[in-house]
Amino acid sequence: MNIQNYINGQFTDPISNEWLDNYCPSDGEVYGKIPNSSIEDVEIAYQSAKSAFGLWSQTTLEERSRILLKISELIEDNLQELAEAESQDNGKPISLAKAVDIPRAASNFRFFAHAITQFFSESHESVGQNAMNYTLRQPIGVVGCISPWNLPLYLFTWKIAPALAAGNCVVAKPSEVTPLSAYLLGDICNKAGLPKGVLNIVHGSGTTTGQAIVEHPGIKAISFTGGTKTGAEIAKIAAPMFKKLSLEMGGKNPNIIFADCDYDDMLNTTVKSSFSNQGQICLCCSRIFVEASIYNKFKTDFIEKVKELKVGHPSEDSTQIGALVSKAHLKKVMGYIEIAENEGGKILCGGNKVTVKNFENGYYLEPTVIEVTNNECRINQDEVFGPVVTIMPFYSEDEALSLANQTKYGLSATIWTNNLKRTMRMTQQIQAGIIWVNTWMMRDLRTPFGGIKGSGMGREGGFEALRFFTEQKNVCIKY
Ligand code: NAP
C-alpha cells in the first residue's frame, strides 16, 4: 500500500517523487512505499497551515471541541482498520493495538476536546496601584509535531490533539517506519470536518523531512518524542532560533522490588512492565532491582512466567510478543545481548531469534532476562528498547536508591512496597519525572508527563500540554 502526504486536506505525492520502502516487521517484506518528503513539501505544508491559522485560531472553543470529539469518535468507529494498520506496520500484537494503542488515540482527542473548554488563565490585581493584570494565552501559530514508531498513533495524537485544541495549525511527521495509522488519520480528519490546512502530515525520513520541520523559521514550536540523541540534535538547531521545545526522550527505568510488596501483583505486573510491546515502550522497566531476601524466589518465578510468554505473528490473538519494529532494531537489540554476555552478564532465559512458521524473515526475538552483578555495565546504562531486562539484588534502601539514580536517564520508576514511610522517602529522592508505586503505566491524562536528565525537557499531558502550545502575554490595565 502506497501512502501519501496529507496537505491542505488533500492527499499528495512528494514533489521530488522520492519514495521509501515500508517494511512489514512480521514477515520482513516490503509492502508499500512512503513519500520521502523534502524541504519543498514541508514548505507547502507550512504555507497551508499558515493560511488556515487565522480562521482556526478564531474558531470558538465549542466548535473546536466538537470537531476533536468527532475525530475521537471516528477513530473508535475505525478501531479494527487502525489496529490492523498499527500491527502490520509496527509488529505489535493486534490485541495490544486494539486494547491500548487505538483506544488511547481516541482518548487523546476526547481528553483535549474537553480540556480546552476548561482551560483558564490567571489574573492578578495590583492592590493599591489601581491596576489589574491578566494573562492572555494565545495559540502560537504553526507548530511542528514529530513522533516515534513504538506507539505510533497513540503518541502522534498525544501531540496533535492539544496543539489543535489550543488553536494552532500543525505540520506533523510520524516515524518513517510506522506511517500507516497517521496516513489513515488524514481521512478521518476530513470526515470530521477539520478545516483544510489545520493539520498537515508529511512523511519521510528524520534527517530529511523531520529536520526540515525543525529548521523551518516559521514553525515556532517543536514537540518531539524519540531518542535522546535525536532530541539533542533537534535542540541544537532549535535553540538558536529560540523555538519553544518539548522533548520526550529515552529511558532506562528501574523497577525496585522490596520484600514487603504484594508479591503476585508485583510479579504479574513486572512481566508486563518488562515485555509489553516487545519492551519497546519508553516506560518499560528494563532494570529490575530486587531485595536480596526474595531475590532467588523472584528469579525462579519470574523466569517461569517469562518462558510462558507466546512469541508469534502479531495478527494471532494468542500472541503476547510480536515482532520487533525493524531488522536494524533487531540487530541492535541482539548486539546488546552479546555485549551483556561479554561483560559477564548471565542469560537466564531467552537471548535467541525466534523463527515463526511461514514468517521466517520476521524480526522475532525471545523475551530475555539477564542477571548482572553491577549497574555500570552497558546493558544497564544504555537504552536497549527491546524485550531485554536485567535483574540484580540489593541489600538496603539506600543501595536501591543509588542504583535507581545511577543513570543518565530520568523518565520513570516503579517501586513495589507496602511501607508508607519508605514510599515517601523513595519517591522524593528518585530522579524521574513519573513514579509508580505498586503499579505500572497507570495513566490519568490530566497529570504532567515527561522526564528529567537525559529523558526530557518540558511536560506533556493535561493543562501542561495546553500551556506548551500557547504563548502567554501579561496585560496590565491601569484604572
Ligand atoms: P528517533 O529515531 O529519535 O525518531 C523519533 C522521530 O524523530 C521519528 O519521527 C524520526 O524520523 C524523527 N527524526 C529522526 N532524526 C531526526 C532529525 N534529525 N530531525 C528531526 N526529526 C528526526 O526515535 P525512535 O527510534 O523513533 O523511537 C524510539 C525512542 O523514542 C526511544 O529512545 C524511546 O525511549 C523514545 N520514546 C520516548 C517517549 C517518551 O515519552 N519519553 C515515548 C516513546 C518513545 P524517522 O523515524 O523517519 O527516523
Image (cartoon, rainbow, N blue to C red):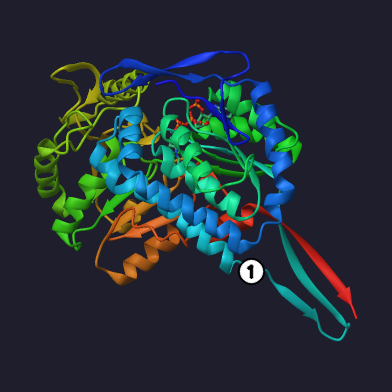
Answer whether residue 449 is visible to the viewer in this image: no
- Total numbered circles: 1
Which residue does the image show at 74% across and 41% down from the upper left? 242
Of residues 388 and 4, the one nearer the viewer is 4
Q: Percent x, y for residue 122? A: 69, 72
Q: Is residue 191 left or right of residue 441?
A: right
Of residues 6 and 131, the one nearer the viewer is 6
Q: Is residue 329 above or below residue 112?
A: above
Of residues 464 and 44, the one nearer the viewer is 44
The residue carrying pointer 1 sits among few (fewer than 14), some (14 to 19) or many (20 or more) residues within 10 Å by Cα, namely some
Mark 1 close to ligand 1, CB under 8 Å: no
- Inspect the image, locate mark 1, and give the three-letter code of the amino acid beneath it: Phe
Which residue does the image show at 59% across and 50% down from the upper left? 164
User: Which quarter shows the C terminus?
Assistant: bottom right
Answer whether residue 24 is visible to the viewer in this image: yes
Q: Quadrant of residue 346?
A: top left
Which residue does the image show at 28% across and 56% down from the upper left? 396
Q: Percent x, y for residue 119? A: 60, 66
User: Which quarter shows the N terminus?
Assistant: top left
Which residue does the image show at 48% across and 16% down from the upper left? 20
Q: Is residue 313 left or right of residue 209?
A: left
Q: Percent x, y for residue 283? A: 37, 45
Residue picked out by circle 1: 120
Q: Residue furthest right?
A: 479
